[in-house]
Image: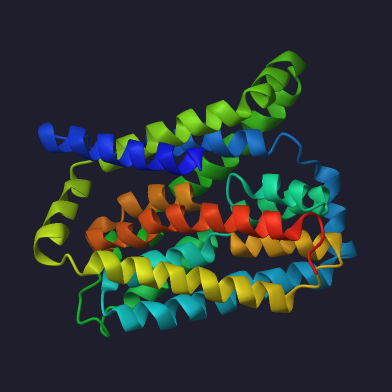
């Protein structure tokens, strides 16, 4: 639960800072910071030889792809439309397409799943972040009419895809290969990875909630306060459905399918938050609400599942 405290503290302090100052102006450098501090360490143990697992476990891989890029987005759309809010729906949809996360390998190891396959899934899902961005762009284009909102493609998320690919995937991957040659440095980073991750998450959330655009949350609180409980209920329903879906679809006797299970029930929340902050102009500040509440739902849910599992997914 310490991570929840870090998230809440970072959000509150960042918002207070932005409220009492002119706030931060968004810079894409935050993507590079997130890539180096959060994504790069998770790639240290990824071996190119893991790619052969794609052919060995094709059915599991394709099953996971279908779940994460077809079924979950459909669930997010269904829930999002019931909220009657474009921003909340967009936030849910983005979460649905961003599989895994910084702690997914922790849960995979804890459940005695196949860690090599888990690392492969982590790498593939990172490569598919650009697909997630284009899916969100398509969602904005076609769903905006339902919410009677305008979505300008010229300012849509699709135009950020190249930067995200470079800053969050290519550079962290190259950096991870370089650091692997410097054994003492890699060992040092791995030893303190938990603390580096926590400090990084706090800094990223503090920065993002201190942005000038994020201060618009005050308007939501003043004029659309009902969106807060709506977003919370939507997130609870979303995670409940994906948990039971994942429990039903995957064969929990298989170590590979247990790894795929965790890549389904966990979402890449900090990455979602980073992406959301530079798309608020397209979807509205309420897009932040489901992502904020996802932290306080996903982390306890993962702990609960892990305790129930105790190494056996039946």
Up/down of 24 relative to 302, above or below: above
- Residue 186 in picture, x, y percent from top left: 70, 22
Is residue 294 found left or right of 260 in the rendered image?
A: left
Q: Which residue is drawn at 25% across and 71% down?
A: 151
Is residue 136 found left or right of 282 in the rendered image?
A: right
Q: Which residue is drawn at 28% across and 42% down?
A: 209
Of 287 and 171, the residue lying toward us: 287
Q: Residue at x 73, y 74 (%)?
A: 63
Up/down of 5 relative to 121, above or below: above
Of 301 and 125, the residue lying toward us: 301
Where is residue 10, by image quadrant? top left
The reply to whether residue 190 is visible in this rendering is yes
- Residue 268 in picture, x, y percent from top left: 53, 53
Up/down of 57 relative to 6, above or below: below
> Colour scheme of this structure image?
rainbow
Q: Across the whole image, how many numbered discs are drawn on residues?
A: 0
The reply to whether residue 90 is visible in this rendering is no
Of 2 and 183, the residue lying toward us: 2
Residue pushed farthest right? 56
- Residue 42 in picture, x, y percent from top left: 66, 39
Is residue 256 found left or right of 307 in the rendered image?
A: right
- Residue 245 in picture, x, y percent from top left: 63, 77
Q: Which residue is drawn at 25% across and 83% down?
A: 145
Q: Quadrant of the C terminus?
A: bottom right
């Amino acid at each position: 639960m310490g991570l929840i405290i870090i998230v809440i503290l970072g959000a509150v302090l960042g918002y207070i800072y932005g409220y009492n100052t002119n706030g931060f102006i968004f810079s894409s450098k935050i993507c590079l910071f997130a890539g180096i501090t959060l994504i790069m360490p998770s790639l240290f143990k990824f071996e190119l030889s893991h790619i052969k697992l794609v052919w060995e476990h094709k059915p599991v891989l394709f099953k996971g792809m279908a779940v994460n890029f077809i079924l979950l987005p459909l669930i997010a759309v269904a829930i999002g439309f019931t909220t009657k809010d474009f921003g909340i729906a967009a936030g849910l949809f983005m979460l649905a397409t961003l599989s895994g996360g910084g702690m997914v390998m922790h849960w995979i190891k804890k459940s005695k799943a196949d860690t090599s396959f888990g690392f492969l899934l982590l790498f593939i899902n990172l490569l598919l972040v650009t697909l997630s961005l284009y899916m969100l762009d398509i969602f904005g284009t076609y769903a905006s009419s339902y919410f009677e909102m305008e979505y300008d493609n010229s300012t849509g998320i699709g135009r950020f895809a190249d930067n995200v690919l470079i800053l969050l995937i290519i550079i962290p991957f190259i950096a991870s290969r370089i650091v692997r040659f410097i054994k003492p440095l890699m060992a040092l980073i791995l030893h303190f990875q938990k603390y580096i991750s926590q400090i990084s998450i706090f800094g990223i959330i503090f920065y993002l909630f201190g942005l000038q655009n994020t201060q618009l949350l005050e308007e939501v609180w003043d004029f659309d306060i009902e969106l807060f409980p709506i977003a919370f209920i939507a997130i609870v329903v979303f995670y409940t459905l994906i948990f039971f879906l994942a429990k039903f679809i995957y064969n929990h006797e298989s170590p590979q399918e247990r790894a795929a299970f965790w890549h389904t029930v966990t979402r890449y929340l900090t990455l979602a938050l980073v992406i959301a902050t530079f798309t608020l102009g397209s979807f509205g500040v309420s897009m932040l609400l489901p992502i904020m509440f996802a932290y306080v739902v996903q982390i306890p849910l993962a702990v609960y599942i892990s305790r129930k599992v105790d190494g056996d997914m039946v």
